[in-house]
Image: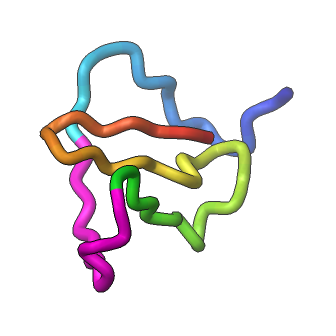
Amino acid sequence: MTPRNTIPEIDGAFKAFAEVRFDDLAGGTYTREHDLIGQSNWSWDTPLIGKVSDLFFVG
C-alpha cells in the first residue's frame, strides 16, 4: 500500500487530546466515541474511553 501523503510515521511516544461529550452517563462501561470524519484506514475510528486515564483504540 502506498501512503497518500508524506507525513512521517510515529516512531516514539506522543500525546493526543480529545474533547468528548457524553449525554447518557448511565449508558454503561465502554462508552464509544465515534470519529465520524476519518472513515478510512488512516484514522482511529472507534476509540474506547475507559473509567481511568487509559485509552484504548479499536480500528
Q: Measured from the top left, where is residue 56 in percent x and y?
A: 39, 36
Please identify the residue farthest to the left as the structure is shown. Answer: 53
Question: Is 38 left or right of 28, judged from the image as shown?
Answer: right
Say whether residue 36 is magenta.
no
Chief SS of the magenta region: loop
Question: How many labels sit on residues?
Answer: 0
Relative to 50, say whether 10 is above or below. above
Relative to 11, say whether 6 is above or below. below
Residue situated in front as seen by the camera: 40 or 5: 40
Q: Could you say which quadrant of the image residue 14 lies in?
A: top left
Q: Residue at left 39%, top 14%?
A: 11
Please identify the residue farthest to the top as the structure is shown. Answer: 11
Residue situated in front as seen by the camera: 59 or 25: 25
The span shown in magenta is 16-28
Question: Is 53 left or right of 28, judged from the image as shown?
Answer: left
Q: Residue at left 54%, top 53%?
A: 46
Q: Residue at left 14%, top 39%?
A: 53
Please identify the residue farthest to the bottom as the structure is shown. Answer: 23
Q: Measured from the top left, where is residue 43 in percent x and y?
A: 58, 48
Residue situated in front as seen by the camera: 28 or 47: 28
Which color mode does the image show? rainbow
Q: Measured from the top left, where is residue 59 in percent x and y?
A: 62, 41
Question: Is 23 left or right of 30, judged from the image as shown?
Answer: left
Q: Measured from the top left, where is residue 44 in percent x and y?
A: 54, 47
Q: Residue at left 46%, top 39%?
A: 57
Q: Quadrant where the N terminus lies? A: top right
